[in-house]
Image (spheres, coloured by chain):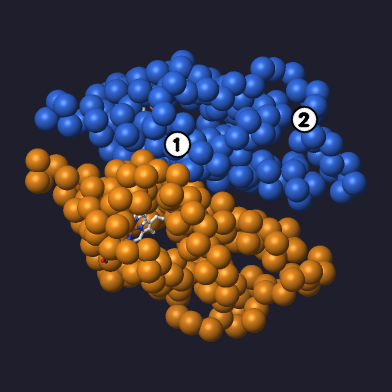
Chain colours: A blue, B orange
Amino acid sequence: MLLKKRKSKEDTALFRLEENEGEIVLWSENREVSRQLSMIDLQEEDLLVLQKLRPLVKENIEKIVAQFYKNLEKESSLTKIINDNSSIDRLSQTLTIHIEEMFTGVIDQAFFDKRSKIAQVHLHIGLQPKWYMCAFQDLLLSLISLFDETIENREDYNKAIKATTKILNIEQQLVLDAYQKQHDEIR
Amino acid sequence: MLLKKRKSKEDTALFRLEENEGEIVLWSENREVSRQLSMIDLQEEDLLVLQKLRPLVKENIEKIVAQFYKNLEKESSLTKIINDNSSIDRLSQTLTIHIEEMFTGVIDQAFFDKRSKIAQVHLHIGLQPKWYMCAFQDLLLSLISLFDETIENREDYNKAIKATTKILNIEQQLVLDAYQKQHDEIR
Ligand code: HEM
Ligand code: HEM
């Protein structure tokens, strides 16, 4: 475990990432995507931060996913989409894996391919972008609360927030862009 | 001025908002929009927080808008759109007013009408949603940095971050939703 509750203010080693575990990959063959990454200032350091956060997110994933569903229940059309196309159980599993994957510190071709597939699936089930964006905000709020409870050091907390907003932003960009393109094709 | 640099940890009155200045309005006649607001947990308290942050944002608006443009220069197609349809000066003015308005603490019919108009203008000039979303992430990062530098108290800082991510999220939802609808109509 890398994150400890009630860490003292002085103990700021958390994101001084010399001894990182996994490989960091920040790669795109698409020049436009590279510029998108540059414009949101998503750098290797952010991927290292996300990787460091991963154990914490994994430990709390059940709570995050439970909140995700509780939130969707506010909009009955979403519950209907889920029941017609999947099940709470199946989607929970999908989501558990996917949210953890946001914190692997790897952005490569498989990452882009997966977002294109997500757009395709969501378009197919008729999920409107606005509800998709609502779900992202809910996810962000859950993650902010988790970091707030567990990361005492202000600088680390700040880095965690910034890196997380960046990875959620690029995901939405990629999915909504693919969604729009695929939507235009089939009209 | 409501925010002071280097506030002591104990001095937490910032967002204990009994003595607020302006009127808070959180109103939508559209039931679907009300559910969007509910799903992102945007409450009156967030609007109060935004209103309290307004003087700080106003004081630093030049820096934020300058960074906004510096960022757009990474993508030459955006500079071209601006030069063809407006000017840096004019858009700076537009943006200065608009960003300040995000912190008025008012969500009413005029708020919704304005977002519909923004979608229309951006569609007309050919601004792709992905670049629009990049610009929002940049704006969010500027605001986070500003709050980090000026709001010492962790709870206040956290409230500022949450309220800000919520208002930026609903804005993107409204604009991108209207954008999509208008785009579909003219195809
Ligand atoms: C934070 C927002 C969301 C994320 C990250 C997300 C992620 C995913 C992922 C990774 C998949 C699997 C795609 C594949 O097969 O490769 C998926 C499928 C699906 N999503 Fe979402 N989703 C989100 C929001 C929603 C919402 C709001 C709904 C509400 C209707 C929804 C309903 C579904 C359904 C029904 C499937 C397909 C069935 C299945 O895998 O069981 N998703 N989503
Ligand atoms: C955070 C993201 C953005 C916000 C909040 C924003 C906001 C606005 C607003 C409020 C208007 C005025 C709409 C009206 O007439 O009622 C506008 C217009 C315009 N925007 Fe954006 N915008 C954003 C991103 C961009 C980007 C990335 C570009 C790059 C091309 C851009 C280019 C323009 C242009 C050319 C106009 C019209 C001309 C003008 O008012 O001078 N905007 N925008």
Residue at 14%, 26% in the rendered image: A186
Identify the image quadrant of the N terminus of chain B: bottom right
B75 relative position to A106: left or right: left
Instruction: Judge whether B58 appears above or below A166 on screen.
Output: below
Q: Which residue is mark 2?
A: A17
Q: Point out residue B50 in the picture as x, y percentages from the top left corner.
A: 53, 68
Is B102 placed above or below A84 here?
A: below
Tell me the element at label 2. Answer: loop
Quarter occupied by residue A21: top right
Q: Quadrant of residue B30?
A: bottom left
Residue B63 screen position, x and y as percent: 55, 65
Q: Amino acid at mark 1?
A: Arg
Residue A69 can be seen in this image: no
Compared across the picture, whether B9 is left or right of B97 comes to: right
The total number of labels drawn is 2
Kindly identify which chain the residue marked by label 1 belongs to: A
Residue tagged 1? A35
The location of residue A35, given as percent across then percent down, is 45, 36
Q: Amino acid at mark 2?
A: Leu
Which residue is located at x 73 percent, y 58 percent?
A: B154
Which sits in the foreground, B55 or B111?
B55
Q: Quadrant of the C terminus of chain B?
A: top left
Q: Residue furthest left?
A: B186
Distance between mark 1 and mark 2 Cα atoms: 25 Å
Residue at (90% x, 46% y) in the render: A10
Q: Chain of mark 2?
A: A
